[in-house]
Image (tube, helix red, strand yellow):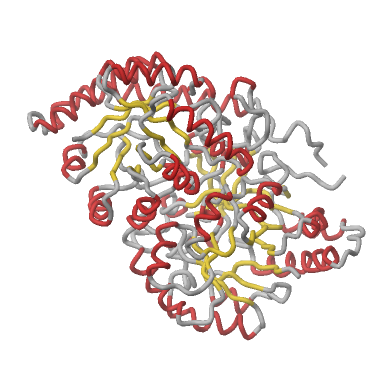
Amino acid sequence: MTALLAPAGTTEMAFAAIDEGADVIYVGPLGWSRRPYESEMTDDEIRTVIDYAGARGKQVRVVFNTFPSPFEMDGFLDKARRFDAWGVSGFIVTDPGAIALFRRMFPHLVLHVSIGSGVTNAWDAQFYRALGADVIILPYRWGEEEIAQTRAASDIGLEVFLFETVQTGKICPGKCIMSSYLKFRDWQEIEGKDYFYGSANRGAKECYRVCQTKWDFGVADEPPAPLKLRRDARLMLEQLPRFVDLGVECFKLSGRERPTAMIRDLVRFYRKVLDGIESGAARDMALHADELAALQARWVSEKRKRVDTLMTRAAGLRSDAPWIASA
Amino acid sequence: MFELSTNVATPKQLRQGDYSAYDALYLGDFSCPDYPKNFSADPDLLAGGVDTVKSQGKKCYLRLYAVPSNHDLPWVRKVAEKALSLPFDAFEVHNLGLLLMLREMGCNKPIHLGVFGNLYTDATARLVKDYGVTRVYPNPELSLKEAIYIRDHTPIEVLTPVHGKIPLVVSETCFIVEHSDKAVEGDCKFSCSQDHWLTRTKGEWSLKDTGRMTLSGSDLCMLEHVEELAAARLSAFYVQSHGEDVGYAARVGEIYRDALTRAFAGEPQGDLSSQLEALKGLAKMGLCNGYYYESAGRRYFGEN
């Protein structure tokens, strides 16, 4: 039985994703989930979403995919206790130490290892399984061979993003701090924090997607070539039947920062595709190619808008801390 | 009193470089298994390398490949097996699967967690300590205060980079090869031997790219802060020299050896302007303080 995980950057998006057939939705608490505040939720909103999902037999995962500061671990754990008390079904976590702590604190909940943990091989899966993690998200570059090897090495649940496997470019989740080297912004009051621990990896200070804007690249004394550090991701389709056969249990849509209508249509589409594969009624993915192409065009368009927004924000930000005088 | 270390990728660099300022050397380029004669990728080079370093009275650590895929693990295991029979003082790993593998191999050597090991919390430091890790290289995003907190509350030794470009990204694929008209399938032609830069005029951004690793454009420089480091009882210092000319480690090491020796002896640093000028001369894109003082990594804050 496969599960479709859908993003919920807002309560509106959460309700839409649940209504369209997502099995699980994931939400980020303000300041703890690597997204700007407009794509995260207040605690009250998360409680509302937990209640809405529970009433419909669906599950909610709370995303704690920041690397917390050692100074804020108590607040981190307090947040998690609160969501547990409200009936959340599990957490998506990045920091290995936090995963181990969560396992001891919440033996009854589902723990996912986030893409930001930087898994690269099947032994990583064994390591996280030994910590008590239930599900591991697989790297963007992995195909059938790596999935089969990991399935053979560990009984940990396997989750993949609904993106095509990509072998080129700088695609390094969990192994990249470029954005914070170049720019950061201060916490905003709404995020509930007033201290510096500053980067996308560490909270609501968003990643500016600097890998997706244009750079000049080359040797010092030669004309540089304009390029992006990675190409646009494409939505996954053809691989799905084989991935299901190999034991992938969770398929994850990203896009908490996308428009709700886009997520609603994607959930509807992938619900239909996965149901067709599981029932055996529609394993020929060519049946869905035209519909996917239309969704892909919308996806890329929305993504470009998002990158432009982030780069505009980055351009308006300082690279220094306002309270420290520079030499 | 303190240890100053740097990195050496190949036997040639070990022969040609002057490492007299250093107490310890990390052998190998952890980012690229295709780098010619890389200690991290060739078990046949290890005995000669460790002998050379030990004959100079230094500690010798072996760096293991940072981002091993499933198909890399067999050769990485062979490198580790060979190194276990040699007098290396420690292994450096960046990958938790590899850390598990070393334990299952019965590794009896100390292990250092490398810069891409995602060490952000004392909770993680305690976790990896249970797997034999004795020294951690905190993620560069951490402030000095946070690194010191982790050291004290784990407790564990913390490696403190004091100079050199900051590792920002490591990838399983080579960006230079992907954009090279010289490289062909299976033969990269060692294109990374030339300096490659990523620049963006809008925002005045610059990064150095060595193919599988992207580094800060500016050089981290803590020369003006060595007294603070000594006062904080930090004791393991590191000069990052990956991707630099062979003379870089020698000159930088000499400057920091002098400064740290004075700081640990409680002597004043005096006028550092000539040393700073020398370091600026080695840095093509200027100096920075990384994230140590709670800012974006590329800023530089002087004492004054």
The quadrant of the rendering that contains the N terminus of chain A is: top left
- Report the quarter where the C terminus of chain A lies: top right
Question: Where does the image place residue A277, in percent across and percent down from the top left?
Answer: 14, 32
Q: In this view, does B235 lie above or below B115?
A: below
Q: Please, is residue A269 above or below residue B201 in the view? A: above
Quarter of the view holding residue A312: top right
Give the residue displayed 32% in from the left and 33% down from the top. Answer: A252
Residue B81: give x, y in percent of width and height. 40, 76
- Point out residue A59 in the picture as x, y percentages from the top left corner: 32, 26
Residue A222 visible in the displayed image: no
As rendered, which of A75 and B196 lies closer to the eye? A75
Q: Tell me if residue B169 comes above or below residue B264 in the rendering.
A: above
| Total numbered circles | 0
Furthest-left residue in this view: A281
**Left or right of residue A82: residue A189:** right
Question: Would residue B239 be visible to someone looking at this image?
Answer: yes
| Residue drawn where x is 45% and y is 48% of the image | A100
Identify the residue at horizontal 70%, vertical 69% (top origin). B3
Front-lying residue, B4 or B271: B4
Residue closest to the eye, B115 or B234: B234
Residue at horizontal 53 percent and vertical 33 percent from the top: A78
Q: Nearer the viewer, residue B5 or A57?
A: A57
